[in-house]
Amino acid sequence: MRRIIGFKGKSKSRIVATAAVTVAALVATIGLGTSTSSAAFKTADANTGKLVYWFWGESDIPGSTAWMQDAIKRYQAIHKGLTIELVPQNSDTLQGAFETTAQSKSGPDIAMQWATLPVLTPVWRGQVASLKGLVPPAEMANWLNTSENVSGGESWAMPLYLLGQPFVWNKALFKKAGLDPNKGPKTWKEFLATCAALKKAGITPVVVGDKDGFFGSWFQGTIGTQNLNSVKELQDVYAGKAKFTDSKYSDYLTKLAELKAKGYINSDVTSIDLTQGWQAFAQKKGAMTWTTDGNVATWIKAGMGADLGVQSVPKVGTGKLASFYTATQSISAYITSWSKNKQAAANFLVWLHQPENVKSWYTTTGSFPADKRFSASLIKDPVMKALYKLNTQPNQLWAQNYAPPQVDSQGLQPAAQGVLAGTSTAKQAAAAIQKAIDAWRTQQPKDLAAYKKWAGV
Amino acid sequence: MKSDQLISVGTATNSRRSERWPYLFIVPMVLIILLVFVYPLIAVVRNSFYSGSISNLSFIGTANYVNLLRDDVFVHAIVNNIKLLLTVPITTLISLAAALILYENIRGWKLYRVILFLPYIIPAAVVGLSFSYLLQGNGILNTALRNVNLDFAALDWIGSTTLSIYSIGAVIIWSQFGFGVVVLTASLLSLPTEVSEAALVDGASRWQRQRFVIIPQIKETVQFLMVLQAITALAWVFPYIYTITKGGPANSSMVMDLYIWQYGFSLGAVGMASAAAVYLLALSGVLILIYSRMRKRQSERR
């Protein structure tokens, strides 16, 4: 009560003064904000100002972050008025972090997602700027695999490198099991026979990690599409024109269950993640695995080259896609729709594809640039030569990128984990994937409509 | 109007004004509460009736709530949260036992209390990552078990669909146990010693003193601790789950907060995430209601 009486008298004027100061501060803050944004606007479309680049690549291509940091330094030295902040991203949070930042329309000027659906989903949500008008068509004509990120006749993202998914084996372990070290299994029958021989010799035939679920998607992409005749047939199942429980889609789960039941896959497959699985392969804890070019390049650098055999996955199905190799531009860089420096961002992306950078990318990381100007004569290692040949063959597809991200994370991945953990049958897993497809179709009607339009279904 | 009437009206107006002034003081706090708690809550409830991403929402009524109940993964997530509630009595019991031992003034009890508290101050993500390596199929724990010929006990702790959620529960108990010990020890130390000493003079055994004299006096602290732990088990287990199993294998260790994160942030399906958050809020609300009832009943008895 005393305080109130005191307040009533003297402090009334103080309150008014405080309120006036607060209002003035607010006005000043708003004014400052306006001037900042107008300053940013003035720098638009020039190689000045600041760009924030959310970068991902280390998991595919070890050493790629360091290369990008160096490239940024060189670019900033050319364009003194431009600052590029590189923010490395994690695989686990790549899609989630972008979706979160997109909700507030703030954050990166350049972001990255895996090609096709992971890029096109934010495109359809209005979060990505088209490259039309930002990148000259003559420049874009040099980029490889751009078709993976085309929607509505426009290209939305820049490829940085090519990524193949080779099937790899350890020649020394093959030899130990009495197998021909220079010959990988070409058919499912041969694959099972190879597994049996390795197991008999006390060697774990296949070593992979699937705690993060990615291997489940990869197995579907490499083995599960082999009974299909076209990409359209693959899109049909997500668009609702076909059922995943149809054996031509789900037969791969039977094969996965067979590997598990026969003890041909490492026992800790569901408690280690994909990267740990590769580490186990490098430590000779298993004879065969599914991996990426980037990892093969790293293993070669580590002196494992002589022991590595690489090829496409064994042929399992009878569809036309059985002869396709699993390759993609992998991660794609795009400019966000809210970026105030779109042209500066596009100029930087174009610069990354200039011949000296294309060459430097390869010599530093050992990964193949997604650019026609790359000279294959630079590849000296026979294993890498074989991989480049696979990556540039005309028939290639990375099927995981055609699955809506929700179906991938809620269907393909957990279903395969269930099979690998020994708690789901192939039939139950196929039904679970169909249920995830149905859930996505019900819960995301706008994404479904965009998907159908894009797929022409 | 007469002058004395005017004075009376003036005084009444002044009095009303002076009554209003205190409310002005709380306006900033009320605004902050509205902005930080009420607005997000209203936004969550509102979004739960929409589908699509946040920038592109469409009204779909109660479809998200219906879809959630039809979703086996969500139902499984609720069941898992309920399973994790089992950690509450276990953590409380062992915390209480440890606190009672420390209360007996054993030599070095302060040091023991610090050691027991250490797991609680380690960030949950660090705890999760460490245990994810420790509990792998061929991880440190199983390697140690195999080395001492206990192969039968070397189970697939986090890679098995049946064991994963219980393994996480054990990690949560390990992590939360220290907090319980510190809270209960503090409560025990604040008790008057006369009652316990009187019981000792009357010939009560150690067990009898603990069971009938000491524990009843810290009953309210125990209840409070249990409510805190229950809320942790319902809504704060995300970092453990995410770092140890990522909700797998095959969604076997999925819980509600990870489910909400997946839909809301990873997939951008804000409506589904919001509806799931409303269910979680309701479940937490029920718990708080039970606790309030218990408190009310106790104060009525007094």
Image: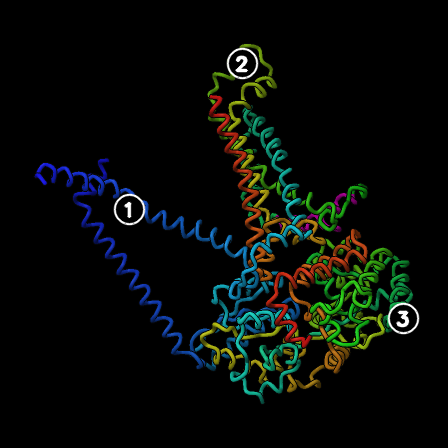
Residue nearest the observer in this picture, B138 or B22: B22
Identified by mark 3, the residue type is Asp
What element does badge 3 sit on?
loop
Q: Is residue A61 left or right of residue B49?
A: right
Percent x, y for residue B216?
Answer: 54, 22
* Residue extending furthest toward the top: B202
Residue B24: mark: 1
Q: CA distance from mark 3 to mark 2?
A: 83 Å
Q: CA distance from mark 2 to mark 1?
A: 54 Å
Q: Which residue is mark 2?
A: B199
Residue nearest the observer in this picture, A324 or A435: A435
- Tell me, yes or no, whether the highlighted magenta stretch contains residue B134: yes
Of badges 2 and 1, nearer the viewer stands 1
Cβ–Cβ under 8 Å for marks 3 and 2: no
Going from the N terminus, do you reach mark 2 or mark 1 first? Answer: 1
Residue A180: mark: 3
Percent x, y for residue A260?
Answer: 83, 57
- Tell me, yes or no, whether the highlighted magenta stretch contains residue A89: no
Q: Residues within 10 Å of mark 1 (few under 14, many from 20)?
A: few
| Residue span colored magenta | B128-147
Q: Are labels 2 and 1 assigned to the same chain?
A: yes
Percent x, y for residue A392?
Answer: 73, 81
The quadrant of the rendering that contains the N terminus of chain B is: top left
Does residue A347 sit above or below B245 in this rendering? Answer: below
Residue B40 visible in rendering? yes
Residue at point 61%, 78% (across, down): A151
